[in-house]
Every structure is written in structure tokens, then in C-alpha cells.
Image (cartoon, rainbow, N blue to C red):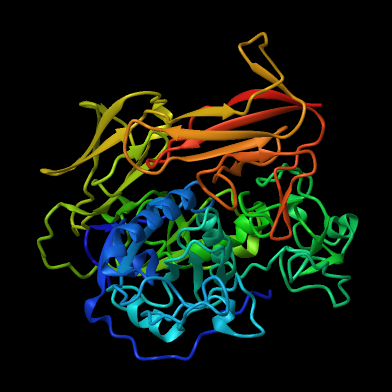
């Protein structure tokens, strides 16, 4: 029973590719090192991304850290990871390998290497395997992930990076990706879509270059595949009916597009291209909703700042993080206090998901007015907060969690550049200050305790470089226009005033934003546009039909700031 004066709470916000393990061997974690990359709170209450490295010798470890930084900065540009960044802990487990590289890379005839996770291409060096299917010893992965204290299979996701420049990955119980391929940082979120989201592939083939044929099965269990017509989806309120007709986050419009589940005909998906079909684009709304549900399902909602409704004996008596019982003037006797905490994200529209434990939770106390809580001194202090060791972006939401003294609710005083500003109960949305340039200081104070954050409000910039044009001119509004008589290249270079990986993106004619990773075969090479695209490993890249096109470009820095999109016009004749 609770008899203290104040109650204080808080709140935080298919068929998948099988992960076939090579024969298991005992893992020896003695030499492994757990490196906290980003800690936003108690791992028992957070979603924890645990990243393992395999095939990196002690001398290779700087390379692993470089690969990890690239993967993370790409991940933070993709929703819902971008919005939930402040509720994600990231831990790297550095595992020195006796050999550099992984097995059967890139061919079955390539060496078998002895590495801690026994990662291997070709489905684990199988004659009948798929070359790009990169698998590992699942038992060994669990052994090393268990070194991260406070994480469990229920609140973490394991991602393993291989010391390889070969394209490959897998998604099943765990996710894998090659660390150094030009597209590696995009393989990881796709495989996390499988492992974390239970999403299916939207490919219209199983073996590249071989059409998948016609789907002949029943209505798929997959949330993002169907046999229904668009009218049936709408009238029966099935599948992605709540999103139909909206602009897709991955480009185009949410509708019905043929192909998926490794079949080229007879089955349909929501978007023309999305993360689960084409690496480089975002998740569309259907996949984003599922990923939001799965990330939220691994976060303990009752811990930070989401608004709440607080009923006493069935009657709503307040909203907010604190309830001062004396102000309720309760009648003598026993009463029940119940608080409901909900994540109000607009990424979720399905009421069943919104009301599930992933996004809505409740806590109940019994209050007996005849009892008195003994005075147990609890100092006013911070319990956790947005990390202070790295700059936060100008659009970030910064949160703090305080201790919970029984007799008072600690009040947070916020200051921006030394001037007091208003915030929420336990958080402050920096976006409302419209900070556009420079460096700023945010402080929070409870009692005599203070925490400070550096706000990076300087947006990154992007420079573009094109191959020689046949004609060029500057149009009204200072928009550059170029004319090409054939194929041309484009290089984007993002820069920022702070160190770290800058992620550049571009889009053509208002389609979805696409991650600029260089060229599929070489991250240092520019993007090549041709009329029919360039076929690499049975996939076409850089297709741009004849005529006039608008190309927009932008970048996101390590703090999460995204620059204002710029553009130029090209005509291919």
C-alpha cells in the first residue's frame, strides 16, 4: 500500500530469411570488451542494440569502430530509429579475432577462418547456399551479447558486423551485415526489419536475375503483402487500409504494387519501393508502424515523460507525471490510484497496437488514509537523462528522470543559454526554439543538481560535383541547370562543423529520399545516371529516363540535424 504524500511516475515515449548457424563451438568471452556507445537509461528499461564484430583482429579494431559509426549514423536517419533514438542504448562488443576476415568470402573456395562468431557467407559455406547470406554461430552471439549487463533477449536486438567488403547479411533470430561494403549500412536496417520487425522481403525474386514467377498461395500472413484489390483492402478494412492514398515515406503513394515474397506476379505490396525491397529508401508507413511497435515493445514505458491520465477510484483526477495526494482531499478509507501511460506517436494508427502493452501501460496503487509512510529520506537528484557526453541536435527532445521522494515532486528548471525557459514535466522540445545556427547550452536543475547539454544547431552542408555537361546555365532563383547528351555522374560530399559521419541523400523528381552511398561496387566512386540504369549483380542502379529532371539533395549530421534541401535540374537528351 502507498501512503506517502506524492506519487511520481514517468514514461518513455511473415516469413523471414532464416539465420542458419554454422556448427556451434564454445565461445570464450574473456578477451571481449563491452563499449557503451550510447546510454540513455537503465538497460533493463530500454531497447538495447548490441553490436558484435567478427573477424576483426586487435589491429582491425579501429576499422570495426569506423564501420559501426557509419552504420549507426545511417540508422539514425531512418524512422522510427530517428525519433526513438533517445530511448535506445547502443553497446558495442569488441571481440578480437585471431584471424582477419570471415569464412567463404567471397567464394566457396575462399579460406575458412577461425573467428569468435564463425561468420560465413554462402549460408555458412554450403554448396547449396546463397552467396550473400551471411550467417553466424547463434550460441556464440548470445554468449557475447550476455556480457552487456542488464540486457536480455526480451529487451535487446543483436546486430553482428563482419570484417568484410562483400555485400551480404541475414535476418532471423539475429541480424548480420558485412561491415565495409558500400551498401553495408543499408543492409543492417533491412535485416533489422526481418529480425526486429518480423517483416518479409518485398523482392520479386529469390535468386537475383531469375524472375520469381506467380504467387499461388493463400492470403499472406505478412502485414505488407496481400491478394486483395485496393477496393477490397479499403472496404474490408484489411492490411494497410489506414494508410491508403497517402504519400509513402519511401516515395510515391501508398497503394498496391505487384510483386513480393519472392514472386513477381500474383501478390501485392504497399509501396513501389521501400526498405524491404530496395536498399537506400526508408521504411514505408506500414513497415514503420510495425518497427515502432517492436521497438516500443522492448522499452519500459513507465520511466520518463509521456503524459498520463490518473484516475482515483475510477475518476480521472489529473494529467502529468505527478499526483499530490493531499490535494485530492480523499475520504477516510482505502482508495485505488491507477495511472495510464501511452505513447501518442502518429507512426501508429492501428488501435490494437496502440492499446497493446508496447504503447500503453498502467500502474495501480492502493492508498490507505489510516496509514502514514515513514520518513525515508530520498535526495533530490537526477536518475537518468539524455546523454550529456555528445551534442544534441536543434530538433531534439531532451529528457531527464529524477529521483522520487515520497513527500515532494522535484521540479525541473530549464535554461537555454543562461535564460530560463519552459519545458514539460521532465522534457523539453528544442524544436520550438527554432535554433538555426551556432552552438548553444541547455541546462536542467533539480534541487542543487545540474546537468548540461551542448546543442549543435549548425546544419550540415552538401556539395555536388557532376561530370562535364554539354550545356549549363543558372535559372531564375539561382537554380543551376545542366544538359547531358548521355550518361553522367554525381558525387555528393556532406560536411559539418563537427567530426563524425555525415549522411547524404538525394531524390529525383520528388520521389523518396535515397541514401547516397557512393556506387554499389565502390563507396568512393560517384553515382552514375544512365537512361536504362547499370546492372550490377542482376539489379539496375541509376536509371534516369530522357527528359528534364529535378534532383534534390541534403545531409544529416551526427547530432541529427538535417540541412535544408537544395536542388539542381538536369536534362538528359
- Percent from the top left, x then y, of residue 389? 23, 47
Q: Nearer the viewer, residue 346 or 96?
A: 96
Is 307 left, or right, of 549 in this rendering? Answer: left
Tell me: residue 195, above or below residue 457. below
Tell me: residue 46, above or below residue 344. below
Res 495 quadrant in image: top left
Tell me: residue 512, above or below residue 419. below
Q: Is residue 79 visible?
A: yes
Res 210 quadrant in image: bottom right
Is 36 left, or right, of 119 in this rendering? Answer: left
- Percent from the top left, x then y, of residue 150? 30, 73
Q: Nearer the viewer, residue 15 or 336?
A: 15
- Percent from the top left, x then y, of residue 212? 82, 69
Q: Where, quadrant-wise, is the N terminus in this rendering?
A: bottom left
- Percent from the top left, x then y, of residue 344? 53, 51
Tally of numbered tags: 0
Is 94 left, or right, of 378 in this rendering? Answer: right
**Going 51% across and 85% down the picture, which residue do you hit?**
21
**Going 42% across and 54% down the picture, which residue do you hit?**
72
Is 241 left, or right, of 174 in this rendering? Answer: right
Q: Is residue 13 visible?
A: no
Q: Residue furthest top?
A: 476
**Going 32% across and 47% down the picture, which residue do you hit?**
399
Q: Where, quadrant-wise, is the C terminus in this rendering?
A: top right
Q: Nearer the viewer, residue 443 or 101?
A: 101
Amino acid at each position: 500500500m502507498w501512503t506517502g504524500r506524492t506519487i511520481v511516475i514517468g514514461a518513455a515515449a511473415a516469413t523471414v530469411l532464416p539465420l542458419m548457424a554454422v556448427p556451434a563451438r564454445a565461445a570464450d568471452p574473456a578477451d571481449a570488451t563491452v563499449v557503451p556507445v550510447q546510454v540513455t537509461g537503465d538497460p533493463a528499461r530500454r531497447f538495447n542494440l548490441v553490436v558484435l564484430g567478427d573477424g576483426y583482429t586487435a589491429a582491425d579494431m579501429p576499422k570495426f569502430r569506423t564501420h559501426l559509426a557509419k552504420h549507426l549514423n545511417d540508422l539514425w536517419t531512418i524512422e522510427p530509429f530517428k525519433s526513438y533514438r533517445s530511448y535506445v542504448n547502443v553497446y558495442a562488443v569488441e571481440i578480437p579475432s585471431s584471424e582477419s576476415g570471415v569464412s567463404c568470402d567471397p567464394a566457396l573456395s575462399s579460406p575458412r577462418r577461425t573467428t569468435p562468431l564463425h561468420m560465413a557467407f554462402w549460408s555458412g559455406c554450403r554448396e547449396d547456399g546463397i552467396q550473400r547470406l551471411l550467417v553466424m554461430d547463434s550460441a556464440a552471439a548470445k554468449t557475447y551479447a550476455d556480457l552487456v549487463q542488464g540486457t536480455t533477449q526480451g529487451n535487446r536486438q543483436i546486430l553482428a558486423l563482419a570484417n568484410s567488403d562483400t555485400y551480404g547479411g541475414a535476418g532471423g533470430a539475429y541480424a548480420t551485415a558485412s561491415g565495409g561494403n558500400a551498401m553495408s549500412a543499408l543492409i543492417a536496417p533491412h535485416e533489422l526489419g526481418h529480425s526486429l520487425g518480423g517483416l518479409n522481403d518485398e523482392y520479386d525474386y529469390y535468386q537475383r536475375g531469375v524472375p520469381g514467377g506467380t504467387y499461388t498461395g493463400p492470403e499472406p500472413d505478412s502485414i505488407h503483402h496481400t491478394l486483395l484489390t485496393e477496393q477490397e483492402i479499403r472496404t474490408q478494412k484489411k492490411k494497410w487500409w489506414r494508410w491508403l492514398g497517402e504519400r509513402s515515406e519511401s516515395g510515391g503513394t501508398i497503394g498496391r504494387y505487384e510483386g513480393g515474397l519472392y514472386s513477381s506476379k500474383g501478390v501485392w505490396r504497399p509501396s513501389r519501393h521501400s526498405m524491404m525491397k530496395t536498399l537506400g529508401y526508408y521504411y514505408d508507413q506500414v513497415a514503420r508502424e510495425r518497427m515502432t511497435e517492436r521497438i516500443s515493445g522492448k522499452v519500459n514505458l513507465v520511466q520518463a515523460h509521456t503524459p498520463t491520465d490518473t484516475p482515483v477510484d475510477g475518476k480521472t483526477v489529473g494529467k502529468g507525471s505527478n499526483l499530490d495526494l493531499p490535494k485530492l482531499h480523499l475520504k477516510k478509507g482505502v482508495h485505488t490510484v491507477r495511472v495510464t501511460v501511452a505513447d501518442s506517436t502518429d507512426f501508429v494508427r492501428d488501435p490494437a497496437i496502440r492499446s497493446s502493452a508496447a504503447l500503453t501501460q498502467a500502474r495501480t496503487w492502493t492508498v490507505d488514509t489510516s496509514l502514514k509512510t515513514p520518513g525515508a529520506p530520498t535526495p533530490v537528484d537526477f536518475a537518468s537523462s539524455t546523454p550529456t557526453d555528445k551534442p544534441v541536435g536543434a530538433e531534439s527532445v531532451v529528457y531527464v528522470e529524477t529521483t522520487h521522494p515520497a513527500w515532494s515532486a522535484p521540479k525541473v528548471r530549464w535554461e537555454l543559454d543562461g535564460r530560463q525557459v519552459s519545458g514539460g514535466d521532465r522534457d523539453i522540445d528544442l524544436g520550438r526554439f527554432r535554433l538555426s545556427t551556432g552552438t548553444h547550452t541547455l541546462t536542467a536543475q533539480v534541487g542543487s543538481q545540474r546537468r548540461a547539454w551542448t546543442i549543435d544547431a549548425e546544419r550540415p552542408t552538401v556539395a555536388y560535383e557532376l561530370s562535364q555537361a554539354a550545356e549549363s546555365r543558372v535559372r531564375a532563383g539561382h537554380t543551376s541547370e545542366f544538359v547531358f547528351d548521355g550518361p553522367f555522374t554525381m558525387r555528393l560530399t556532406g560536411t559539418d562543423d563537427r567530426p563524425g559521419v555525415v549522411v547524404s541523400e538525394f531524390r529525383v523528381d520528388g520521389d523518396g529520399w535515397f541514401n547516397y552511398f557512393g556506387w554499389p561496387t565502390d563507396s568512393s566512386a560517384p553515382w552514375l545516371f544512365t537512361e536504362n540504369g547499370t546492372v550490377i549483380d542482376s539489379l539496375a542502379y541509376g536509371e534516369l529516363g530522357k527528359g528534364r529532371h529535378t534532383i534534390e539533395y541534403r545531409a544529416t549530421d551526427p547530432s541529427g540535424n538535417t540541412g535544408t534541401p537544395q536542388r539542381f535540374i538536369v536534362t538528359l537528351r
